[in-house]
Image: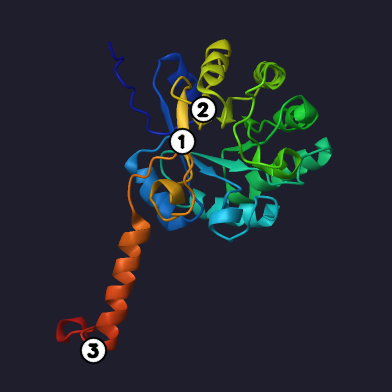
Amino acid sequence: MSTAKKEYKRITVKSLIEMKKNGEKIAMLTAYDYSMAKIVDHAGIDVILVGDSASNVMAGHETTLPITLDQMIYHASSVVRAIERCLVLVDLPFGTYQGNSRKALESAIKIMKESGAHAVKLEGGAEISESISRILTAGIPVMGHLGLTPQSIYKFGTYTVRAKEEEEAEKLKKDAKLLEELGCFGLVLEKVPAALAKEVAESISIPVIGIGAGNGVDGQVLVIHDMLGMTHEFNPRFLRRYLDLYTEMNSAFKQYIDDVKSRDFPSDKEQY
């Protein structure tokens, strides 16, 4: 029997924890600019993640590593200006928090002050616990990220599924518990076995958002360019394309080119 869905005028960290408690799934998408964020927010999304995936889909880099803190702030501030309801979560980019908790705090404060975002996300478990704790002391909400952590791609050497072996699965479970104990309000699990993700979600009180982590978690996140079909060379098992914008946009652009070259556009009605 389904529980009546509570209507939220504004999504906060508290709202997300309440949604997990009430059994309501959390919907998250990435966005990186004002126009897209405005559409996503009006559609009723719960969380917009201003992901460091902007390095890939917006800037064309092979990995997430090159994007800078100032570039993340630019994207995040664009998104914040567009939203009315959802929570805006921002990735701390590579090199702004690992190994230096003071730098981590300064990076998080800079994002919050200059973008107006509501929370930050960091990749890793015990190895970044000091950075997480320091950020939390400033009253900044933190979401964790375990499993496949793209900022560590050169350590892993591949984007394959993580925590399939018992040793890595046990570490992931311990890290998830640790993130909860430190005070994180939520956790992203990326590309881990569905059974493991479900076990983690049931073992902690904070929301677990999955991407390639099955349906036993508390919510889902996708990169918006992927789910809209704007990218067409990326085809992981977990991706559901809701549109084929690559084909539709390509068709529209070709039609525009033809109309301009044939002098069909602009028509008499489309000029002053």
Residue that numbered label 3 is attached to: 263
- For image coordinates 62% across by 38% down, the residue present is 120
Foreground of the two, 240 or 187: 240
Question: In the rendered view, does 228 fall on the left or right side of 73?
Answer: left
The vertical placement of 101 against 66, above or below, is above
Q: Nearer the viewer, mark 1 or mark 3?
A: 1
- For image coordinates 34% across by 22% down, the residue present is 6
**Which label was assigned to residue 238?**
1
Could you classify mark 3 by the number of other residues whose Cα lies within 10 Å: few (under 14), some (14-19), or many (20 or more)? Answer: few
Residue type, mark 3 in image: Arg
Q: Secondary structure at mark 3?
A: loop
- For image coordinates 62% across by 23% down, the residue present is 164
Residue that numbered label 2 is attached to: 213
Could you classify mark 1 by the number of other residues whose Cα lies within 10 Å: few (under 14), some (14-19), or many (20 or more)? Answer: few
Disc with the residue nearer the chain's start (3 vs 2):
2
Q: Residue furthest left?
A: 269
Quadrant of the snapshot with the N terminus? top left
The vertical placement of 5 against 72, above or below, is above
Quarter of the image where one finds residue 246:
bottom left
Residue type, mark 1 in image: Phe
Quadrant of the snapshot with the C terminus? bottom left
Measuring from the top left, give residue 220's x and y in whole percent. 46, 31
Measuring from the top left, give residue 237's x and y in whole percent. 46, 37
Disc with the residue nearer the chain's start (1 vs 3):
1
The vertical placement of 56 against 212, above or below, is below
Measuring from the top left, give residue 186's x and y in whole percent. 57, 26
Q: Is residue 92 visible?
A: yes
The vertical placement of 235 against 271, above or below, is above
Q: Is there a contact, CB below 8 Å, between mark 1 and mark 3?
A: no
Foreground of the two, 221 or 102: 221
Question: In the rendered view, does 146 fall on the left or right side of 259?
Answer: right
